[in-house]
Each structure stands twice: as C-alpha cells, then as structure tokens.
Amino acid sequence: MNPPTDTEILSAPAADDPAVNPVQGIDQTAGNFSYKMDYEFDAGTGLSEKTVRYISTVKKEAPWILEFRLNALKQFFAKPLPTHWATKDLENINFDKIRYYLSQGQKPKRTWDEVPDDIKKTFERLGIPEQERKFLAGVEAQFDSEAAYSNIKDIVAKQGVIFANSTEALREHPEIFRKYFGKVIPTGDNKFSALNSAVFSGGSFIYVPKGVKVTHPLQAYFRINAENFGQFERTLIIADEGAELTYMEGCTAPKFSTSTLHSAVVELVALKGAKIQYITVQNWANNVFNLVTKRGVAHEEAEIKWIDCNIGSRLTMKYPGVVLKGRKARGEVISIALANDGQHQDTGAKMIHAADETTSNIVAKSISVGQGRSTYRGTVHIPKHLKGCKNNTECDALLINTNSRTDTYPAITVRGDANSVQHEASVSKVSEEQIFYMQQRGLTEGQAMSLSVNGFVNDLASQFPMEYSVELKRLIDLEMEGSVG
Amino acid sequence: MTETQNLAGSFSPAMFAEHLAAVAHLPAWWLDRKRAAYASFAALPLPKRTDEAWRFATLAGIQLDGYTLPPPVATAALGHLAIGVAKAGKFVFANNRLTASEAISPELSRQGVIFETLENALLKHGDLVKSHLLAHPPRQGSEKFSALHTAFLHDGAFVYLPRGVEVADPLVVFHYAHGHGAAVFPHTLVIAEQNAKATVVDFFRSADAGTHFACGQNDLYASHGAQLTYLAAQTWSPTTLAFQSNSTVARRDARVLSLNLHLGGRQSRHESHSQLQAPGAHTEMLALTVADGAQEFDQRTLQIHQAPHTSSNLLYKNALLGRAKTIFSGLIVVDPDAQKTDAYQSNRNLMLSDDAEANSLPGLEIQANDVRCSHGATSSRIDPEQEFYLQSRGITKPDADELLTFGFFEEVLSKLASPALHDVFHGLIRTKFKIVPPAP
C-alpha cells in the first residue's frame, strides 16, 4: 500500500500550471519519496470521531482527554477557514487525504541513495553531522538521540524539572498539567488550534519548579528525534515562580516531512517572576502547510520571549503571542522570516496587555527572495484603564528581486491616556551602494548580496544560540544563491 | 421582499422611485446607472463582524432606518455662516438642492473654467461628467454605501479647470442637512486638466441638531502637471451617521493635496482612495480628527502606486477626548513594477482621555523591490517632558496642554498655503475644545 503522494494530498490545480505554481520549473518532486508502509497503528486518512477515538485508545488516555478531543473535533468542523483575512491558499488543504496519526516507531524509512543530491549538498554546506543527516533526510527513523535526550532529562530531573511528551505528561502528572492544558489557547481559538486539540500527539510538556533556573537550553531537537516528529505537536511549558527556562525547537536543516499539514499548539505559562525563552527554527520542505498557534501567559513580573525563525514551508501562519496578565510582565517577539519562490511566510506577533505597567516589544524582519511573499500580521491590544503600558513594534522588510512581495498588516488598539505604543515599519531593498562597495573589494555580487542580507538580520540572529546563528547564516547564503543576476 | 427591505432600511424602492421622478430630466445613461446602483445597494448586505474592511467598527451603530428624503429648505433657515475667506465661487446646497450660489468671475468663465451644479453639468457637459463621475469603484468595504450614494445623488458641485488655468481663490461648496431624519448625498466632482491649479473646499454642516444621514462622495481628477488642493471640513450634528468617500486620480507629475477635518457626527466613516497612475504623480493625504463624547471616526485609506517614480505622503492625526473611538486603517499598495515608489503613511493618536480608544491598522502591500515605503503609528498622551518644560516657564498646565494639542494639529494645518483657510480650520478645531473642562 502506497501513501498518497504530496501532489495528491493537495487538491490544488495541477502544480505545473504556472499561473498556480510560481515555482514551476523547479523540480518539486525533489522532496517526494515513496516507501513501503506497514503501520501497526494507523488511523487511516481523513478525520472523523472514529479517528479521534482511535488515537485516544492507542494512547490509553484518561476519559477527560477523549472528551476534550471530541469537543475540539466538533469545533474544528464548525469553524470556517479564516480566508476572510488569510490567504485563499488554505483552501488547497484537503483534510480528507491527510493521515492524522501514525504511531511511534512506525516511521517510514527510505534509503540514503534515494535522497536527492541537492539535499545532500545542503546538509554538507550546513555542516550537519553525518548521523543527523540521515535522520533529517528520513533515512533513519530514530537518530541516535535517545542517549542525548535521557542525558538532559536526567540532568534536569535532578532539579525537579519534568520533561516529557504530551501523552506521558497527561497520564503521569495530570495534577500539574491539567490545570493549564488548553487554557492559554482555548480549543476554539481558531480552526487549527481546534484541529490540533482533536488529534494532538507528541510535543513536549515541561514543568520547572519554583526558583529553578535551567541552565541547559532544553532542546526538542533531541527529544523529538527520539520519537515520531510531531505533525500535530502539543507543547505546554510551565515555569513556576522565579523559574527560568530556554527551550529550542526545530533546527536549521531542511526537514523533509511526509505530511503536508503541520499544525502545532504551544502554550507557555510563566508564573510570578518566571522567565521563558522559546526559540523556533522552522525549515519544513516547500510543500508543507505550517499553521501554528503559539501563546504564553506572563504573570506578575514574568517574562516571555519568543524567538521565531521561519525559512521553510509552503505557507506558514504563525503569530506567537503573549498575554501580559500580571503587573510589570514583559513580552517579546523576535521574528525572522525568509520567503523564497513558492513560499508565503505569514508571521507576526500578538501582544495582549491585561495589567498595569506591562511592556512588550516586537521586532520582525523579513526577506523576500524571487517570487516569495512575506507578511507581517500583528495585534497589540491595550484595553481600558491600564496604566503605564508600553509597546514598541518594528517591522522591516527586505525585497531582493523585482517581483518579491511583502505585506504588513498590524492592528493596534489603545485605550486611555496612560499608555503608549509606537509602531514603525519599513520596506527596502539591498543598497546598491553597499553591493558596489563590496564588489569593488573583490566580492562577487552573490557574496555581496549574502553579506548584506546577513547584515540585515544580524542583530536578531545574534540573539540565537551560537550554533543556530551560524547555521542560519549558512542557510541565508544558500537561499541567496541564484537570486542575483 | 422583507429581506430586501431590511437591507435597504429607509431607502425603500418607493423612496427610490420618488427620487428618480425628481431627476427624470437627467440623461438616460445616468438614470440607468442609478437604477443599477439601487439594485446593488438593496442586494448588498450590511457590514458583518467578519469583514476585514470593517474591523473595529461599531456595526450596531450602522442602521439605515428612520431617514427620509428631506424637503427643500430656504437659505434663510440654514443659519448659514460666512467663513470670511475670499472665494472664486460658491455653492450652498441644502437637503440635496442648490439654495444659493456665487458664480465665478467672467474672466474665469472666459478661460473655460466651469463651476456648475452637477445637475446642470449632467445636462450640459454629459460626456465630461460621464467619464469622471464615480468612475472608481470603492475598494475599502463601502460598496453598499457607494451604491446608495449613486442611487440617490441629486445634486452637487462640478468643477472643470481647462489646461493651464489657475484659479487663485478657493472654490467653496457648502453641503447642509436640515430637519430631523434628513438624508443627504453630497457630491463634488473636480476635473483638472493639464497644469491647471485650484483649491476646492467642501463644508459639511448640519443646519440643526437633528439626526441626519449623510452619504457623500467626491472625485478628484488631476491630469498631467495639475495641482489640486482639496479641503473638507465635516461638522455634522452629534447624532448624524455619516459616510464619505474620496477618490483621487493623479496623472503624470500631478500633485494633489487633500486635507479632511473631521469634527462632527455620531459615527463617521471616511474612505480615501488615491491612485498614482503615472510617473511623477504625488499625493499628500492629510486628516485631522477631534473626537469627543461617544463619537466614532472610522478612517480607511488606500494609496495605490500604479506607476514607477510616484510618491505619496499620508499623515492622519487624531485627538481623542471623552469616550471617543477612532479607527485608522491605511494601506499602501505598490503594484508590480512600480519601482522607485516613495510612500509614507503615518497615524498619530493623541490620547487626551482615559476612556478613549484608538485603533490603528497601518498596512503595506509591496510588490516591487526598489521602493521606499514606511509607515508609523503611535498612540500616547501629551509628552510629559514638553508639558513640564512649559510649566517650568510659568504656563499653567491647562494652557500648556492646549498649546501642545494645537501644536499637534499645526504640523498638518501648516501645510495649507492659504493663511485665511488655515485660520478657518484652526477656528473650527477650537470650537471643539471650548467645551472641554481644563485638565486636572
């Protein structure tokens, strides 16, 4: 039995129609693999109450979770696609042809010989270790990360940190996680959060006890590698009073997925004085719809910072948010998006001020290459009778080629005279003078362009952990290749 | 049938038939357009919560019931106030009909300037009117209200400036609504041929404190090298529901400056649609709003750069008092290949009350890379440092606040070349501040 190919899953008009597919001419089949599947636990394609009951049974879940899933499913069916503001491309998702659950250990395999040369080359250029390459290319279902994961897990466990997957956490620590699960992002927040709530599996649940500062950044990279890469990941992080945590998700290497819809829900809770930093680097293959809901609640004097970097996927819609619930809470979103041919990065941020003296900062930079389209969409909301709230938003867009596209759609609501917000956005291209100067110093136009683009995101990229920012730089070099001349 | 009536409110087929009978002498093409517009108005739904173009607007406030086509009214009943500005020509419209006018000088007529009522222009200059009247369909959500305007448009001002002619003094048009429930449909159409230059001013006024309904539109067409200044001051009664839509077309090297002053109405929506169609075109889009009480001002702007080497500059300033609410939604669109576009968009909200609400949606859609586009939006109170400085110089806090508030408006008002018009607009803003108790 063969799985549907990617082109089948998208009910879109023929992909070789240039009017529909601006990336026509580029070999789109590069990311497609065929492989034998023999799923032990296979919920089949399509979504129904049966699918949801099946998932819940396989996971041996408590009845309240099944109840939660079924309710979410109803909401998912009831909600329309948000195409009144979002791109019509969403209509190309065929929900009936998607597999909503594959059980652990049943990941499809392919051989290294099947991996296209350009992908191998990409790995090489990025300096990905041999073993990781095989995992990333889907050759090995389980990259040997089990050891690394349990190592980290053991270290943090000594501090009382719980670091588990969603199924495990809800089964073993309901007293901790149930209270916040689905509370930061209600099931019905949007159609895709409802979908995730119905079929979620995988993801990380983390609890950091009072006053504990986790020195190691927790990397989903290790943990998720140890199981099926989540298509409908569910993450919940709770930092108790005064706790501190940095969490990293994804990696800069291109991630070849067999499924075309990824819809994660990430909830963060920072209790009084806690700090959470959540770093994402998203680089799905070019056929993936990546529709993610991410939100955190920051209590008194707590701080939540999202660092979000989107390079891959066909369409990403992701607006990390912070609800500033306690006095002097602080929220921050740092966002980098790179859209190349055939890609639409619809990203942004949401800052909901709900207490006095809360501050938020949004810095978003996007780069559109070729016919890529990047969109900033943001909300800043300061309701009435709050005092001393401040927001600063900056969005800068860089357009590389003549037909590159960028949009900015912020929405700012302020009530009362005791708060202040400022928003600024600019759109520019790479300075010809800079390019000329560098060429005159012996750089090729391509090198000069890469350098200039890297300079554009440098102040944000430098906030990434070192290995990420190094990989990001290489990745930008790669993406910029062929964009000039 | 009931469905149709719900969507049309007071503006029933019977009311439309009555209106059509009153304008039956006008050209057939125009009557056909009106019939089509009415059909489209009656079929289109009212704005819904999910309409992006109406985001943040109080939709419950938009009801079409309780309005009538008002009877003619004499000029004397308007309490018309002179503005004390030298004019090249004047029209006073009340309840959709002309009640008084001052013709342009014979010299200007000899040069070919036409300053006519729209009704006369439709009869005498049909072709000219046809190609410019309501020629650009709305793109910002008010299709229904634009159709309503087209269907019921009775009369308005028509300005035609031939090639190379400059009109030094402003052409001034007053639009009055009189009597409770009066529905008015003001219109001003300005066509400026190559290198022509003029200033046109619209005043929208309520003759009494009754509840009015205003649904107006104005079309500005600036041909190659033309320079148009368009000013509008809206002081409808505090219970009026108002829609106003502006369409500007700027051709090669044309310059259009528009300034809209919004003071009146219960709930007012203003749309501004500016097209920069040829290289060298420049538009300056300015607006000042003083919102108090429970007023709502909803301003939507669109700057479309359709050709290379065009520029536009938008500055919308709102001062918010009481429980007022403002919405600014702007969009700069740069079409593919409109390289070397230079576009700016700025919304500044001065929060003078703890209960006021300011919404900003400054948007960009850019499809060309060699452009300079930026926007900014700020919402904050009077700068405490500036306030402190003035106080330290012996100026009381209320005086300091007033000075700083007027300083806030002055950035826009100072762009008016005519000192007389500057004073008129400044005076109008001042009326809005008299009722404000001094700040504590």
Image (cartoon, helix red, strand yellow):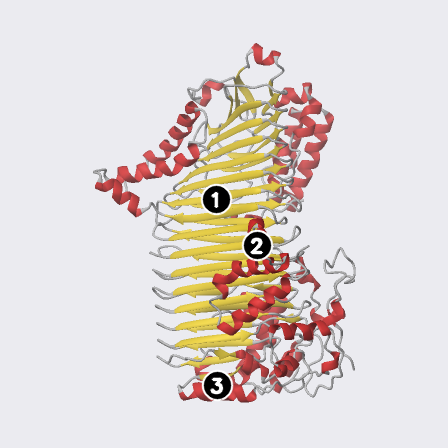
Q: Mark 1: which amino acid?
A: Ser
Can residue B50 be seen in this snapshot? no
- Please tell me how crowded label 3 is: few (under 14), some (14-19), or many (20+) other residues with Cα within 10 Å: some
Marks 1,2: beta carbons within 8 A = no
Q: Mark 3: which amino acid?
A: Ile
Query: Within the image, what quadrant is residue A179 found in?
Result: bottom left
As helix, strand or loop, the secondary structure at mark 1 comes to strand
Q: In which quarter of the image is the N terminus of chain B?
A: top right
Examine the rendered structure and indicate whether residue A114 appears above or below residue A470: below
Seen from the viewer's position, the closer of residues B418 and A337 is A337
Can residue B314 be seen in this snapshot? yes
- Please tell me how crowded label 2 is: few (under 14), some (14-19), or many (20+) other residues with Cα within 10 Å: many
Badge 2 sits on which subunit? A
In the rendering, at what x and y percent does residue B88 appear? 51, 17
Cα gap from disc 3 to disc 2, whole angstroms:
39 Å
Residue at the spot of label 1: B346
**Do the dots labelled 3 and 2 sit on one chain?**
yes
**Do the dots labelled 3 and 1 sit on one chain?**
no
The disc label shown at residue A398, or none: 2
Cα gap from disc 3 to disc 1, whole angstroms:
50 Å
Residue at the spot of label 3: A152
Badge 1 sits on which subunit? B
Seen from the viewer's position, the closer of residues A134 and B336 is A134
Badge 3 sits on which subunit? A
Q: Can you tell which of label 3 and label 1 is closer to the viewer?
A: 3
As helix, strand or loop, the secondary structure at mark 2 comes to strand
Please state if B239 lies on the left or on the right of B401 as rendered: right
Q: Mark 2: which amino acid?
A: Leu
The disc label shown at residue A24, or none: none
In the rendering, at what x and y percent does residue B223 appear? 63, 28
